[in-house]
Amino acid sequence: MNVVYDIFGTVICSQQSMCFKHYTCAYCSRVKTPKKLFSPRETHIEVTHSMPPQKIEIIKSLDNWVENNLLVHLKPVEKCWQPQDFLPDFSSEGFNEEVLELRERSKELPDDYFVCLVGDMITEEAVPTYQTMLNTSDGTRDETGASLTPWAIWVRAWTAEENRHGDLLNKYLYLSGRVDMKQIEKTIQYLIGSGMDPRTENNPYLGFIYTSFQERATFISHGNTARLAKDHGDLNLAQICGTIASDEKRHETAYTKVVEKLFEVDPDYTVLAFADMMRKKITMPAHLMYDGHDDNLFEHFSAVAQRLGVYTAKDYADILEFLVARWKVGELTGLSGEGNKAQDFVCTLAPKIRQLDERARGRAKKAPAMPFSWIYNREVQL
């Protein structure tokens, strides 16, 4: 029998074989990762369709609001940028010279930067998974695949806008010659095949809190890769990453408006949903990333992103603090007893996360170097 203790000395798991018989544990997120046969899998205690019927009616009652307040954050296709706007023109006589210039600029970018850029690109390329996830939500899903409800129109158009991000980064990386495209392509296929489980329970209250958090996270991440590209002298790549970040900011604005509306019409249930998602912890969309070799690829990619300042634990706390302020959570009144507890939890969580991060960094030893298949197994410090 294995006994596991938390940092306070409390027994958190005393099950036979650390609960691997059922791949669940009473501690924290109740997640254990079983042996991976093909790509990473996580087994949670599955909760589906958790939203009460009366809450579905609230969601459906927002159709007109969505049409007038959410769809305005979409851009007409003819006014959208396209990947080709930033890449060498294959039909032009100067194509070869433009590609050579791109490759020369990319030589100034270090391997650890490419690990972050590739990880961001792979995350963007899994957009079919994210559309699927959004279409699991009760009251908002696209029931036919081409429904004309405002919710369905939003999901399809949002997906179409997001699709350009992975396309653009993928083509840039291919032209750069700095990365192993076959390994990257395998990682994308593994990731889409693995799916994702953000633990939103088919519940749009949970789902829109998740997407609000994630869109801000991707805005920050792409903004930081833009900054680093500029620091290394690749202004074209900086423009690419900055343009993608701008899209993510617009999408963040849209999703945070939805949650703001939910706080307006149903504050108690919404703050409970917010606290629920934060207790579960917001999992990154690509947390099941796998390249056929490294079972901990996402953790290794995340460690490099943390070290370079692309996306950090501090950013996680900052996003939480931003959303608490954006939705005026601390100003809510008239909540139930459970609602008041949830309000206090989310309003006091960010400083605790920062404190834990500072302690962890203070205890951290120098990280090892790890090979990444994306860059021909060259080693990068975590």
Image (tube, grey):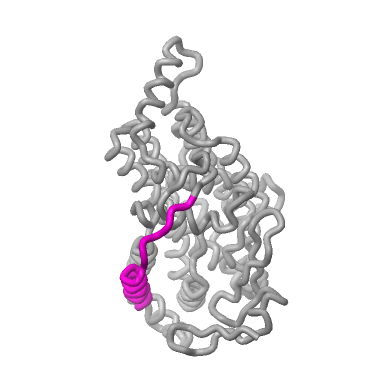
The residue located at (49%, 65%) in the rendering is 282
Point out the stretch of residues depicted in magenta: 347-370
Work out which quarter of the rendered image holds the N terminus and state it.
bottom right
The residue located at (49%, 89%) in the rendering is 10
Looking at the picture, does residue 335 appear above or below residue 361? below
Q: Where residue 223 sits: x, y (%)? A: 35, 47
Q: Nearer the viewer, residue 284 or 210?
A: 284
Q: Where residue 157 sits: x, y (%)? A: 55, 43
Magenta stretch holds residue 132: no
Q: Where residue 34 sits: x, y (%)? A: 67, 67
**Which SS does the magenta portion mostly show?**
helix
Work out which quarter of the rendered image holds the C terminus and state it.
bottom left
Looking at the picture, does residue 2 appear above or below residue 186? below
Q: Nearer the viewer, residue 216 or 30?
A: 30
Relative to 224, 95 lies left or right: right
Q: Residue furthest top?
A: 93
Q: Nearer the viewer, residue 291 or 142?
A: 291
